[in-house]
Image (tube, helix red, strand yellow):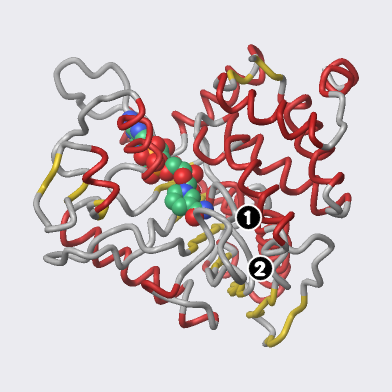
Amino acid sequence: MILTFEQEKAVIRTLLRKLGASEEEASATAEVLAEGDLRGFGSHGLLRLPYIMRALKRGTIVANAKVRVIKETPATALLDGGHGLGHHIATRAMRLAIERAKKQGIGAVGVRNSNHFGIAGYYAEMAMRKGLIGIVTTTTDALVHPWGGVEPLLGTNALAIGIPSKPPVLLDMAMSVAARGKLVKAMKEGKSIPEGWAIDSEGRPTTDPKKGLEGALGPFGGVKGYGLALALEILAGPLVGAAAGKEVKGTLEPVEGFSTKGDFMITVDPAAFGSVSEFEARVQKFLTQLKESRKAPGVVELLVPGEPEFRAREKRLREGIPIADEVWAEIERIAKELGVNLADILARSR
Ligand SMILES: NC(=O)c1ccc[n+]([C@@H]2O[C@H](COP(=O)([O-])OP(=O)(O)OC[C@H]3O[C@@H](n4cnc5c(N)ncnc54)[C@H](O)[C@@H]3O)[C@@H](O)[C@H]2O)c1
């Protein structure tokens, strides 16, 4: 199935509205999920909607949730998301962080009582589009092992850093070498996984995806990636009053009770540190130096973080977003169950 960006958003919005989500919640969720698919991060696109629908039905994601600022200073805010839709709450949190950086030069917003928010880069880009630097992180269920450890104790804790530049620099990455979804896919296809992606439950490196899923994912970048994942777990966990380690629940599948994950976002106005045009010129000079630098054999072009996804985005906006058969079949099943005519939506939102 190939969908346009507008069609994907319309399908998501309609299905979420059917389960009681407000227009604002449904639109924000649709926007971030469809942006995930546009950028080629399919693991954080439409694929996630059935999970969200299941959690809405169980009441572990709350429709029409009350999102409140529960603590604030001129530069900071702590949001209680009321267990609502994570994408919507994170969008609100980043709006607050942007407001604060515009006034104070810097903003930091923490989020608790929320849900999985999809691609971290979406929110860092919101800041970037306002001329700010955006830094975003979040926690997930424990999937990654600590360095030297055997048990999964750290989330894949996405980290996004967006810099307003040309081309825009948008680093957006998980803390694991490979996403859990890639192991699930390899297992379904009967394929092995590269060594380093995961360990089995005894702590031995494995190339068997099933054993890897029973064990733990490897942190990217060895001991340094482990250290970064751990630091982010504390920022988006205990700092904002959310859980850490094994206590983080509800980002993979709906669980008994609410999700205990957290988010943390920082915004910085380059104007707080000097002339914005000078900052832009310096960044430009650096990126040009990087682009024009000598390339390794076989490499034709050096890219900055974010460029692969922005290129995929442009292509998919032109050519449409390919949706995997099994994902679309699940959407059709849900639509049927809710009495939603998908053909109508697709025709109206081309
Ligand atoms: N919400 C959550 O709980 C959660 C958790 C984990 C990951 N995620 C999301 O999953 C998505 C995928 O993460 P990932 O780690 O698999 O991403 P990835 O490994 O595909 O990309 C990581 C980064 O590397 C950059 N990159 C890739 N190739 C490059 C090249 N040749 N030159 C320069 N830069 C290059 C990308 O632009 C990106 O910034 C992200 O959007 C992330 O936010 C979300």
| Cβ–Cβ under 8 Å for marks 2 and 1 | yes
| Mark before the other along the chain sequence, 2 or 1 | 2
Residue type highlighted by circle 1:
Ala
Going by the image, does 259 lie left or right of 302? right
Q: Residue at x 81, y 32 (%)?
A: 10
Residue count near mark 1 (Cα–Cα under 10 Å), binned few <14, some 14–19, many ≥20:
many
Residue 17 in view, yes or no? yes
Name the one closer to the observer, 142 or 5: 142
Residue 293: give x, y in percent of width and height. Answer: 25, 29
The secondary element bearing badge 1 is classed as helix
The answer to whether mark 1 is within 8 Å of ligand 1 is no
Which numbered marker is on residue 314? none
The secondary element bearing badge 2 is classed as helix
Name the one closer to the observer, 291 or 207: 207
Give the labeled residue for mark 1.
127
Q: Quadrant of the C terminus?
A: top right
Residue 283 in view, yes or no? no
Residue type highlighted by circle 2:
Ala
Residue 132: give x, y in percent of width and height. Answer: 60, 57
Name the one closer to the observer, 142 or 291: 142
The answer to whether mark 2 is within 8 Å of ligand 1 is no
Residue count near mark 2 (Cα–Cα under 10 Å), binned few <14, some 14–19, many ≥20:
many
Furthest-top residue in this view: 319
Residue 33: give x, y in percent of width and height. Answer: 64, 40
Residue 130: give x, y in percent of width and height. Answer: 68, 52
Asked if residue 333 is positioned above or below residue 275 in the image, the reply reads: above
Furthest-front residue in this view: 337
Asked if residue 240 is positioned above or below residue 168 in the image, the reply reads: below
Calculate the distance from the C-alpha at mark 2 to the C-alpha at mark 1. Answer: 8 Å
Give the labeled residue for mark 2.
97
Name the one closer to the observer, 299 or 285: 299
Query: Which image quarter: residue 101?
Result: bottom right
